[in-house]
Every structure is written in C-alpha cells, then in structure tokens.
C-alpha cells in the first residue's frame, strides 16, 4: 500500500535517539536547547521554544499573546481542527475567514471586508491564526498590512511549511507576524514523533511561551515575586502546563533538521514530476505563487466535483494507493456547529472541500512508487 504520507527515519536519526537515551537527562534538557538553536538557524527566527506538539504550541502562542475569555480569534476553515481549538482552550470565541480557492489559504480580500465590518461593529479579533496550507505560504504581506491597520496580532500556523519561503523571508523568521508555530508530528516535514515549536523575533513573547510550557514556573530570581535565595526555590507565576519536549524527541529533531533541505528538495522534485505528468488531465494542480517557495507538505489536486473525487479515491485504493483529504471545513464539525456555525457560512471553503484530494507526497517516496501513482491516475482519467 502506498500511503499519502510517511515519515523518513534513517540510521543517523536512530543513533541520535540512542545517545539521548543514554544521557543523564531524559526530559527537557540540553538537547532541547540545541534543537531550538538549530531551528533558529534554519528559519531565521530570533528565538524558538520547542514543545510537545503544534497543538500545544498554538495554545501557548495564544496564551503568550494574552488571549482570554471574551476575546475573538479568527482562522481558516480549511485547516486541521487544532488551528481553531487553541483559541477555545483560552476561552476565546472562534470565527473564520473564507479562503482563496487557488491557494486554499485565507483570502486577503475576504479578510479586508470582514475586518472592516468587524471594526464597525466593534468586535475585532485579538489574533488571526493563518495557515500555510500544504506548505504554500499565505499572502503574508497583504494580510499583515490589514492586521496592522486594525491592531490584530498574527500567528502563522506553519505546521505544513517548515523550509518554505515567502519573497526574501523564511517561514519562521516572523517578518510578517508575531509568532510562528511548527509541527513535528510523524508525517510533517521533519518529525520528533510528536512535537512542535513557537518561533518569534520578540524575546519577551518566547519567554512567556517558555513559562506556559512548564507549569508557569520560573527558577530565575530576577522574575520572582518573593525571591528567597534558597537554591531549591522556584515560583509559579502563571497557570501553565506540562508541554515540555523530551530529550529523546529533541535528539530525533536535531538529526532530522540536518536533512531539512534534502527533504524539501525531494518533495519539490516529486511535485515537479506530478505537475509534468498531469498537464493534459482535467485536474487543477497546486499553486505556487510567484516569489514563494512551497515546502510541499501536501500535494493537493482539485477534481471536477465531489463524485469524481470519491471515484478517484476508490479507484486508487483498489490499486493499493491510499489518498486522503485535507480538510473537512472546521466550522462544519459538530463541535463548531454547536457554536452556531452552519452550512453556507464559508461558501468557497465548502465548495472547494468537495473537490480536493491529497496525493502521496513524502521525502521517502521512491521514483518507482511515484510512477505507479502517476500511471493509476492517468488510467483513471483515460
Ligand atoms: C498537524 C497540524 C497541527 C497540529 O499539529 P500536532 O503537532 O499534531 O499537534 C496544527 N495545524 C495544522 C495545520 C496541522 O497540519
């Protein structure tokens, strides 16, 4: 069976993990810091804080920006549910901005109109969480200008986009945002099994993220309220969580990060081969906007309609190729319908959901397996 995604774990990864297991520290320790420094080097971030998942990273990002009960957070309907849930963890209300059907990212025009309207009503969001779907960077410049104008903070959910570029900026350097979040879930660009990170150019935001990562506890006497000088004394300043990453995971992350460029190049090579193979087929291929470099976490095509999409899925499965769909619109999930959302709220997202399907795309996909996928899809359309 050829799956739509698969991790790439090699000998050097195993050696790193075994060494970590032999070290005196298993939970957060020196390797965590090494991994954070490596992430900064690769993404241009000033500071990074690694955590137990991107879900935790999104939660901590919202907390660091002060999201709380009664606040509003906007995100994209076409994302993994965690992009929206993070705001709910803080007690905030979630709303969505419809997407651009080409890139599957938040549409700057829809954002502008929604902001103007919200501003008139006095219910602007505190934070916008944008998503670089499939690894294709969002229109960051337009979106950051709109958000700046209305005083809205920007978090990039870059779970798909480690290694992507937007103009002269790297995803993670936060040139256009306050914070950027990455995922190291098994099938993302690089993996730590489970894991995530928060990057920023603002050291104070990352310091707050670090506090929330570990119970809201500090051991820094400078930050204490009742510093007592006792070596064992620590203080809890906020209601934090245990979102720490283990040294075992950090060791895997360090080894994987070394291969980031190799992984991205391979993914881009696979995308190019698909693009060339499908030029004459009646499908829409993923868009890479001028001046940007997609990380190609996903290779999402658009079929004619919902019937053709299902037929293609079944046809491929029958030939031992398991495709997948990213994503069912978040606002239509039962949990969010219970918050008042309904069919028709975000028409572009809903229409395009019916046609999208993700083809096999991962660094370890062999040329032979990709040829098989191409043959089967060409056969389907013949
Ligand atoms: C995978 C993913 C997440 C959650 O990542 P975890 O590390 O599994 O918590 C959040 N947002 C998007 C867009 C994702 O793809």
Image (cartoon, helix red, strand yellow):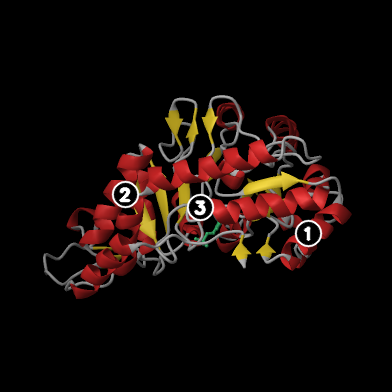
**Which numbered tag is attached to residue 258?**
2
Q: Nearer the viewer, residue 217 or 224?
A: 217
Is 349 located above or below residue 87 in the figure?
above
Q: Splitting the image into 4 quarters, where does residue 316 fall?
A: bottom right
Which quadrant of the view contains residue 221? bottom left
Q: Nearer the viewer, residue 135 or 333?
A: 135
Q: Is residue 167 above or below residue 265?
A: above
Task: Return the disc, 1 or 3, that comes first in the chain's sequence.
Answer: 3
Secondary-structure class at tag 3:
helix
Figure quarter occupied by ligand 1: bottom right
Please report the residue visible at 71 percent of the width from the left and 45 percent of the height from the top: 301
Looking at the image, which residue is at 24% across and 60% down?
A: 31
Seen from the viewer's position, the closer of residues 11 and 27 is 11
**Closer-to-camera residue (360/129):** 360
Q: Residues within 10 Å of mark 1 (few under 14, many from 20)?
A: some
Which residue is tagged 1?
332
Question: To which residue does mark 3 refer?
Answer: 62
Residue 96 makes an appearance in the image: yes
- How far apart marks 1 and 3 lie (CA) works out to 23 Å
Q: Earlier in the sequence, mark 2 or mark 3?
A: 3
Badge number at residue 13: none
- In the rendered view, does 54 fall on the left or right side of 117? left
Res 143 quadrant in image: top right
Quadrant in the picture for the N terminus: bottom right
Does ligand 1 reach within 8 Å of label 1's beta carbon? no
Left or right of 110: which side holds 251? left
Report x, y in % for residue 216.
Answer: 35, 63
């Amino acid at each position: 069976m050829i799956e739509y995604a698969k991790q790439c774990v090699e000998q050097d990864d195993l050696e790193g993990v075994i060494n970590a297991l032999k070290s005196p520290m298993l939970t957060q320790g020196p390797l965590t810091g090494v991994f954070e420094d490596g992430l900064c080097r690769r993404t241009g971030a000033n500071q990074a804080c690694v955590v137990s998942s991107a879900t935790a990273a999104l939660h901590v990002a919202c907390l660091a920006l002060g999201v709380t009960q009664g606040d509003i957070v906007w995100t994209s309907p076409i994302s993994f549910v965690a992009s929206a849930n993070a705001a709910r963890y803080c007690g905030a209300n979630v709303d969505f901005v419809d997407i651009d059907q080409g890139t599957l990212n938040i549409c700057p025009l829809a954002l502008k109109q929604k902001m103007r309207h919200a501003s008139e009503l006095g219910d602007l969001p505190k934070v916008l969480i944008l998503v670089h779907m499939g690894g294709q960077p969002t229109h960051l410049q337009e979106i950051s200008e709109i958000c700046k104008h209305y005083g809205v903070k920007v978090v990039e959910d870059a779970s798909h986009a480690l290694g992507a570029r937007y103009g002269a900026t790297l995803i993670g350097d936060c040139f256009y945002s306050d914070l950027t979040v990455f995922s190291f879930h098994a099938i993302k660009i690089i993996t730590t099994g489970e894991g995530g990170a928060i990057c920023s150019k603002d050291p104070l935001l990352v310091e707050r993220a670090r506090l929330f990562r570990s119970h809201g506890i500090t051991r820094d006497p400078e930050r204490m309220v009742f510093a007592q000088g006792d070596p064992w004394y620590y203080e809890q300043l906020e209601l934090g969580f245990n979102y720490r990453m283990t040294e075992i995971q950090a060791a895997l992350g360090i080894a994987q990060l070394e291969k980031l460029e190799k992984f991205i190049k391979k993914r881009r090579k696979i995308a190019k081969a698909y693009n060339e193979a499908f030029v004459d087929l009646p499908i829409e291929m993923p868009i890479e906007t001028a001046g940007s470099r997609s990380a190609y976490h996903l290779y999402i095509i658009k079929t004619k309609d919902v019937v053709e999409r299902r037929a293609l899925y079944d046809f491929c499965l029958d030939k031992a190729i398991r495709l997948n769909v990213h994503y069912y619109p978040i606002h239509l999930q039962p949990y969010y319908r219970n918050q008042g959302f309904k069919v028709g709220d975000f028409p572009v997202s809903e229409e395009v959901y019916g046609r999208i399907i993700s083809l096999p795309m991962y660094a370890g996909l062999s040329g032979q397996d990709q040829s098989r996928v191409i043959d089967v899809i060409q056969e389907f359309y013949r």
